[in-house]
Amino acid sequence: MLTELKRKLFHLSALGYIALFIWLPRPVFLWTMGALLLLDVTLESLRVFYEPAHRWFAERVGFMMRTHEDRRFSGIFWMMIGVTAAALVAPPRLAVTAMLYAVLGDGIASLAGKRFKGPKWPKLEKRFTGSAANFLACLALGALILRPDHSWLVVMAGALGAVFLELDYIPLNDNFLMTAGTALVLTATAALAP
């Protein structure tokens, strides 16, 4: 549980992307994310494909990595791609909401699922308790950020979308799916809702 808590505290560093998105003009933000992505791809490629770099990273930050990330790009890369995609497809308030769902909702889901246990989703390692905590966190965030400018339908659809996309039924990284996918769900629902 302590390792997971450390991972989720590090996960909060993604709030920096949100701050950049809020403070920078969109074109500057996108150029900045492009530069950060290039840097990340370089470092991740070294870690994954160059053995001395792999050992160096494993000794220093290996405890932060999931087992499946050992020889694959980490969640950092996928979060950066998701944040960039959300910034491209959604209006600013909806993009920020989707980003917060991915940073806070995902973290709360993981910690609650590990802490409170309970039944797992069919064919997954993720637990209903984690999904319930994720839903409540995203619902509260959505209500705080989106109401009254957006309907409760938008808030509810965003929270449900975030919960579904955090699960592993779609074989893509949840850091990407929760951010980009929820931005799409929010944007589409906001366009259709009265």
Image: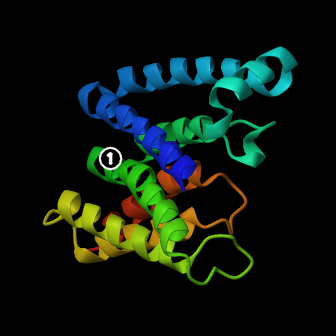
- In the picture provided, is 24 more to the left or to the right than 35? left
Percent position of residue 4, x then y: 54, 51
Q: Residue at x 39, y 53 (%)?
A: 104
User: Mark 1 packing: few (<14 Cα in 10 Å), some, or many (20+)?
Assistant: many
Q: Which residue is mark 1?
A: 96
Q: Is residue 88 visible?
A: no
Taking depth in this image into account, of 117 and 32 the one nearest to the observer is 117
Q: Please, is residue 22 above or below residue 182 in the view?
A: above
Q: How many marks?
A: 1
- Residue type highlighted by circle 1: Val
- Name which quarter of the figure residue 18 lies in: top left
Secondary structure found at label 1? helix
Percent position of residue 102, x then y: 45, 52
Percent position of residue 43, x then y: 67, 19
Percent position of residue 84, x then y: 48, 36
Taking depth in this image into account, of 163 and 154 the one nearest to the observer is 163
- Name which quarter of the figure residue 166 lies in: bottom right
Q: Please, is residue 40 above or below residue 115 in the view?
A: above
- In the picture provided, is 42 more to the left or to the right than 19? right
